[in-house]
Image: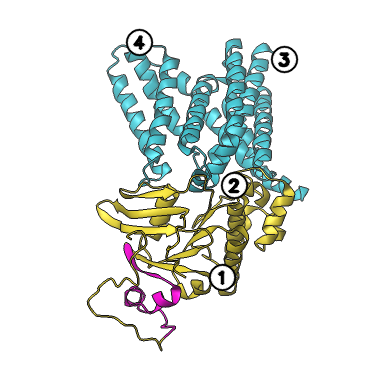
Amino acid sequence: MDDFLLRALLGGVGVALVAGPLGSFVVWRRMAYFGDTLAHAALLGVALGFLLNININLGVVVVCVVLALALVALQQQRRFATDTLLGILSHSTLAIGLVALAFLEGVRVDLMSYLFGDILAMMPADLYWIYGGGALALTLLMAIWRPLLSLTVHEELARVEGVPVVAIRLIYMVLIALVIAVAMKVIGVLLITSLLIIPAATARYFAHTPEQMALLAALIGAVAVAAGLWGSLQWDLPAGPAVVVAAAILFFAGPYWGARRC
Amino acid sequence: MSTAPLVARQPLLSAEAIGVDFDGRTVLDGVSLQLYRGDIVTLIGPNGAGKSTLVRVLLGLLPAQRGRVWQAPGCRIGYVPQRLQIDPILPLTVARFLTLGIAAPQRRLQALLDEVGAGQLLMATVSTLSGGELQRVLLARALLREPDLLFLDEPVQGVDVTGQSELYALIGDLRQRYHCAILMVSHDLHLVMAATDEVICLNHTVCCSGHPERVLIDPAYRRLFPLAPAGLALYTHHHDGLCDSCHLREPIGDN
């Protein structure tokens, strides 16, 4: 197997293993559009990176984290539902990003490479980021697992029972913003948002506990990555979209397979 | 009975002159109440009277703009929220749901579910439970903490009439067994009469309060619930015609 393909497989599987458990909470908390919102905000990060002459990746990470914090703050008031807030933040950050880019005369930004990174162009350094950062993210998620699950089920009940609701939610949002921001650069926004949501939804057909769902989501994501890359090699398909298609096929096949097992 | 605290009996929770405004609209004003161990106090009032808001203030979920809430130190609280909707995409068994707050061995969970009449549900998926089953499971989760104070917000919502009286009988039993104070919210006095010691009739302020049978014939109660069946038509209420908000006795806490 070629080196670049092996790296793509290792990197993609690494991201899938992290995305499964994190993505389970994304679907449980009905935040499926958070990833897309962050992707739009990333454009603003790129623009700020150029304008302020700082590292572009740093710009993206900072803007994503700020957006996550803003969302937590806005969720404190109860007038607007989360999906409304996500819509507002998503489009306004995209627009601000476009406005900011207009100030950059003579700078041509290849947005595509920032937003739709290429899994086949994975570097060895990217692998360190994925596995190091991923292990850290999963450790943190495990540490807040129970209180996060509790507040996902009923926030006020969790508060009465002594869960530091705002702190836990804050940690989770920043965690997921960081994972998306880093993964976006390496494997592309389409791939990371898909790996968060589709395998988690597929896992629901087979899981009986939240933990089973998180583990199965990680495995299903890894299978989708392998299958997608295989298809890409076999039929010369674009690698990222092929992985997403593989994940979608697993999702639509899930109920039939699940039904047969029963 | 409205236990007039002649003897120095420490309340578990005491609220004094609570006031809450939402967008300049007064939701609660000058509401005082005290909860004593072993008592069941029922909060009744029409929709939008501020019942759930008061419960949220007492639980510390919502800050009161006026007044203050005092809680006995070390007082453990159990809470049964009005609504709990679990998305079917979250696979959660009842056993797991019960232990989200604190860990407990399976045997204890089974005993608790048996106690609230939901013994067969330990391994059921929460999102598939009926309204009555869910209320019993929520009650079990609150009891797992061995509460000193139990808050029940509309505990019989979505339960049929037979189930309702069963649940109220159960709540009466729990008070004996756990020797806790219970505050529950209801919008039907007749159903809770048998199970309650004191009724507080709330419509932004305390309209009247006291023993359920006396509240039932209070003009303030009749004004709030004009269509409620006059269960005790034989009684004529002695009313001087001057007092508009008719306090059967002074609201607790004002003494």
In space, the residues marked 4 and 3 are separated at their CA atoms by 40 Å
Q: Secondary structure at mark 2?
A: loop
The answer to whether residue B20 of the structure is visible from this angle is yes
Residues tagged 2 and 1 counted as in contact (Cβ below 8 A): no
Q: Quadrant of the C terminus of chain B?
A: bottom left
Residue that mark 3 sits on = A1
Where is residue A69 drawn, in percent x and y? Answer: 41, 30
Q: Is residue B44 left or right of residue B126?
A: left
Q: Which chain is cyan?
A: A
Q: Which residue is mark 2?
A: B89
| Residue corresponding to mark 1 | B164
Which residue lies most toward the front here? B7
Q: Nearer the viewer, mark 1 or mark 4?
A: 1
Q: What is the span of residues highlighted in magenta in the rendered image?
A: B205-232
**Do the residues bearing badges 3 and 1 touch, measured as CB atoms within 8 Å?**
no
Lower sequence index among marks 4 and 3: 3
- Residue A53: assigned label: 4
Chain bearing tag 4 is A
Residue placed furthest toward the left: B242
Name which residue type carries label 1.
Answer: Gln
Q: Amino acid at mark 3?
A: Met
Q: Amino acid at mark 2?
A: Ile
Judging by colour alone, the chain drawn in yellow in this rendered image is B
Is B250 within the magenta? Answer: no
**What's the mark number on residue A90?**
none
Pair 2/1: label in front: 1
Q: On what subunit does the disc labeled 2 rest?
A: B
**B228 part of magenta stretch:** yes
